[in-house]
Amino acid sequence: MKSLSTKVLLFIVICSLLQTEISAINDTIVDENCPSLANADSLQYTELIQRMTHVCRYDRLERPIEYDNQTLKRLPIVVKTRIYVYLLQNLNSDLLQFKTHALLQLSFQDKRLAYKEFAPERRETILGQKHLSERLWLPHIFFANERESSILGTDEKDVLTSISRDGNVIISTRLQASLYCWMNFKKFPFDQQYCSTILESWMYNTSDLLLEWEDHAPISFDPDMRLTEFNLAQFWHNTTVVHSDHINMRHGAFQGNYSSLSFTVSLQREIGFYLLDYYLPSMMIVAISWVSFWLQADASPPRIMLGTSTMLSFITLSSSQSKTLPKVSYIKVSEVWFIGCTFFIFGSLVEFAFVNTIWRRKENIELKKVNSKYIIKSTLTPRPSRRQLGGSLSNESRARSCSSLDNIVSSTESVRNGNGTVNPGFNNYLTVHPNLPIIRTECADNVSVCSERSTNDHVVDIDKDKKSEKDPPTFTTMTPQEIAMWIDRRSRLLFPGMFLAFNALYWTFVYCF
């Protein structure tokens, strides 16, 4: 019995020794696959990073996980964002895009990389370049309105990674991007464009990742940055949530709400270039077209050459300014100016055609009054002269006749009726056709009556002649050449006055609306 108990005790001791040996072997195997973090203070930075990011401790495909202390609910990771803009290139109006060179900085907390517990003597921050960031988990952020983007340069120096002893990771990337900017050219070249840069999370929705701007100076610009065509008026930033589903598939096959950040710059176009290179030259071209008003109306070659050359010059000037703009359907402010100047140049050509037509007329024009109303009316609808009117009236006049039986009732010509009433005698008249010679008859019985009548008619004609000598003439006669020169003189004042009124309305609209 004693020997049996001794054997059992010996067996137990042997088994415990075997188990201890097996555990030691397993620990040795584990230590070989997962390097120890003991004496981390004495390790180099490269070796320390390699041990902290070993597959036995760190999975770069899994995001940092944090839990709520009260509900033990898994919390999304918060990624703080900051952008420093080195350069904003001028907007490309034709392609509706702009280029930017900027530094994008992303910071987040990853406690798996905190080394203050096993390396308490290390106070410095671990710094590395692209090779360090390739060993870490990084949030997948993209530009939602990008046309193309790339990291500046080809060297690793353009990506900077820092890890603090608390596990705070900062990824800084220098990049360049061509971003779309949907512009409105209704007030070109006095327009103000608003261009946005939009950052969104690509892989993780709001339940896993949240993008937030840094609390202090999230957007900053290089103080030496200068823009040639635009002036940076103001900028602001915003935080939104983008919804993705089977219709709005902006995140591929993933559905849900995704965090988004954006900042917008307000760019005011500088008008100095357009004033000197477009507006002032166009004013001078329009004024040159008015030189034709000082040339004679029959000088066709110089006036035609002046009008057509100014028209072609202005069209060439306008096309050079608008060729860099997209072909939009609405009317721009610059096109209103183009239409107005074209109207005045074309008006000078029409005025030349009008006065040249009047100059070549051969008959004088009679005017009731010498003013714009009657001159324009008479030139458009010429009226017959007074001689023609007088001739037509004389042809329509009738010759008067004389009868020897006026106001006399002859007894021989009176006829009594049966009841004793007397019928008045019928007066005899001699009517003379105006185209025939006038035959005057004298009364046989009473010559004095006819002579008295002729005397009275002669007195009336004398009175009319005296009255016509006292009254001034009603019509004024002007030659076609005088009318053409009169219209040219009025055009010298009318066209500049209308152009000044157009300028006043145009610039008032530009600066008040």
Image: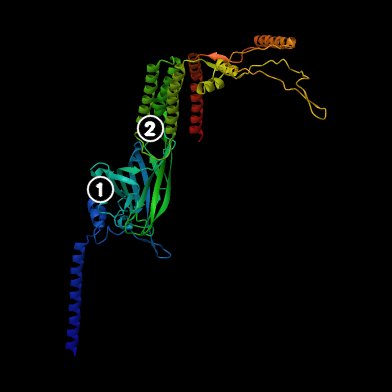
Judged from the image, the secondary structure of the residue bearing numbered disc 2 is loop
Q: In this view of the protein, which residue sits in the foreground, 371 or 409?
A: 409
The 10 Å Cα crowd at callout 2, few under 14, some 14 to 19, many 20 or more, is some
Whole-percent x, y for residue 317 in the image: 36, 27
Give residue 130's mark: 1
Q: How many marks?
A: 2
The answer to whether 513 appears left or right of 250 in the picture is right
Tell me which colouring the rendered structure shows: rainbow
Name above or below for residue 376 compared with residue 468.
below
Give residue 229's mark: 2
The answer to whether 11 appears left or right of 362 in the picture is left
| The N terminus - image quarter | bottom left
Whole-percent x, y for residue 337 in the image: 44, 30
The reply to whether discs 1 and 2 touch (Cβ–Cβ < 8 Å) is: no
The 10 Å Cα crowd at callout 1, few under 14, some 14 to 19, many 20 or more, is some
- What is the residue that sits farthest to the front in this orientation? 418
Q: Nearer the viewer, mark 1 or mark 2?
A: 2
Q: Earlier in the sequence, mark 1 or mark 2?
A: 1
At horizontal 34% and vertical 60% (from top left) the residue drawn is 65
Say which amino acid is labelled 1.
Lys
Give residue 248's mark: none
Say which amino acid is labelled 2.
Glu
Whole-percent x, y for residue 258 in the image: 38, 55
Name above or below for residue 88 compared with residue 318.
below
Q: Quadrant of residue 325?
A: top left
At horizontal 44% and vertical 27% (from top left) the residue drawn is 341
Judged from the image, the secondary structure of the residue bearing numbered disc 1 is helix
The answer to whether 434 appears left or right of 4 in the picture is right
The answer to whether 161 appears left or right of 383 in the picture is left
Name above or below for residue 126 compared with residue 255.
above
- What is the residue that sits farthest to the bottom in this orientation? 1
At horizontal 25% and vertical 43% (from top left) the residue drawn is 157
